Amino acid sequence: MTFSFSLQQVMDVKKHDQIQAKKQVDLARDSFERTATSLYERLKEKETLEKSVQSNQALGMKVSECVQTALYLSQLEKVILKMKEETDHARMEMQKREEQFQLTARSHKQFERLKERQAQQYEQDERKREQQQMDEISVNQFNRVLIG
């Protein structure tokens, strides 16, 4: 007779949940990385533009160019603020998904440990039962020799 875990179906569902949660973590991480990279590129663009403005101001810059650059910088700052919010939201979503994954992983691990303990108990009970059968056989053989 072999060991059969009574909660195997529940454990399988927990494993499936864990796999799905891991996929969600990966998607959230990818989303965060995309938004963070995009934010970094905009910040780099702003920094480059500001350096360019400083060097052009030292050389002399037309008023119209200065106004255009100031407007573009203003729009870029608005975009950066929006992207910071998106990045923060993506980071929070990623952290939330990671927490959910940790919970599902712990839940599955609990079932694995329970299955392992029950399997060990089953093996121990089997060895005990086999030993009792061997003892019974020995006693019967001894009685046959004694009587016979």
Image: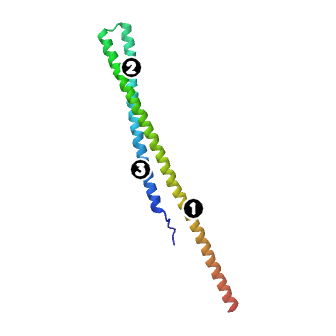
Say whether disc 1 or disc 3 marks the residue closer to the N-terminus. 3
Quote the CA–CA distance across marks 1 and 3. Answer: 27 Å
| Amino acid, disc 2 | Thr
Quadrant of residue 76 within the rendered picture: top left
Residue at the spot 51% in from the left edge and 70% down from the top edge: 2
Provide the residue designation for mark 2.
48
Q: Is residue 117 above or below residue 45?
A: below
Find residue 65 and report its horizontal and vertical position in percent: 30, 12
Quote the CA–CA distance across marks 2 and 1. Answer: 62 Å
Mark 1 is surrounded, within 10 Å at the Cα level, by few (under 14), some (14 to 19) or many (20 or more) other residues, namely few
Provide the residue designation for mark 3.
20
Residue at the spot 68% in from the left edge and 85% down from the top edge: 142
Mark 2 is surrounded, within 10 Å at the Cα level, by few (under 14), some (14 to 19) or many (20 or more) other residues, namely few
Residue 64 in the figure: left or right of residue 94:
left
Residue 98 in the figure: left or right of residue 60:
right
Provide the residue designation for mark 1.
117
- The answer to which of 117 and 136 lies nearer the viewer is 117
Find residue 31 and report its horizontal and vertical position in percent: 39, 38
| Amino acid, disc 3 | Gln
What is the secondary structure assignment of the residue under circle 2?
A: helix
Residue at the spot 55% in from the left edge and 58% down from the top edge: 113
Quadrant of residue 9 within the rendered picture: bottom left
| Amino acid, disc 1 | Arg
